[in-house]
């Protein structure tokens, strides 16, 4: 966390059940988790995954899902996180 800055979480949810896969302190960590879901289950998994967060000012960012979400993690460096699979 950067001194003087409030940590803004990013959430990854299951769109079908509403269950929270995880809350991540940075966008990069959240996207790395999404990448692990894609690697374990294929890109179609993002059709049932919701990705959301807030910007530095606290404004809610548009929720992403599906093909646009599947393209985002490709350029994000890997982060050591446990791989999770949807239940």
Image (spheres, helix red, strand yellow):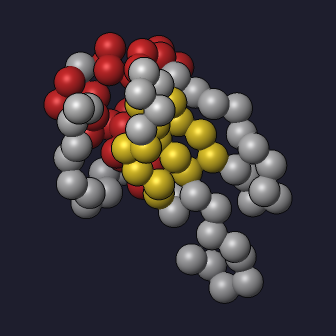
87, 40: nearer the viewer? 87
Residue 64, image x, y percentages: 58, 27
Q: Does 53 appear above or below 48?
A: below
Residue 37 appears left or right of 24: left
Residue 33 appears left or right of 13: left
Residue 36, image x, y percentages: 26, 39
Residue 6 appears left or right of 14: right
Residue sitting at 82 percent across and 59 percent down?
A: 57
Residue 80, image x, y percentages: 25, 60
Residue 68, image x, y percentages: 53, 20
46, 74: nearer the viewer? 46
Q: Does 16 appear above or below 12?
A: above
Q: Where does the N terminus fall, quadrant-wise? A: bottom right
Residue sitting at 22 percent across and 43 percent down?
A: 84
Residue sitting at 37 percent across and 44 percent down?
A: 21
Q: Where does the C terminus fall, quadrant-wise? A: top left
Quarter holding residue 6: bottom right
64, 76: nearer the viewer? 64
Residue 36 in view in this figure: yes
Q: Does 27 appear above or below 4?
A: above
Q: Does 81 appear above or below 38?
A: below
Quarter holding residue 60: top right
Residue sitting at 32 percent across and 37 percent down?
A: 35
């Amino acid at each position: 966390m950067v001194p003087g800055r409030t940590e803004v979480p990013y959430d990854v949810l299951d769109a079908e059940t509403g269950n929270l896969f995880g809350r991540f302190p940075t966008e990069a960590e959240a996207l790395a988790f999404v990448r692990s879901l894609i690697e374990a289950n294929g890109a179609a998994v993002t059709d049932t995954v919701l990705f959301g967060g807030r910007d530095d000012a606290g404004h809610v960012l548009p929720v992403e899902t599906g093909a646009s979400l599947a393209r985002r993690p490709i350029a994000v460096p890997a982060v050591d996180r446990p791989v999770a699979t949807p239940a």
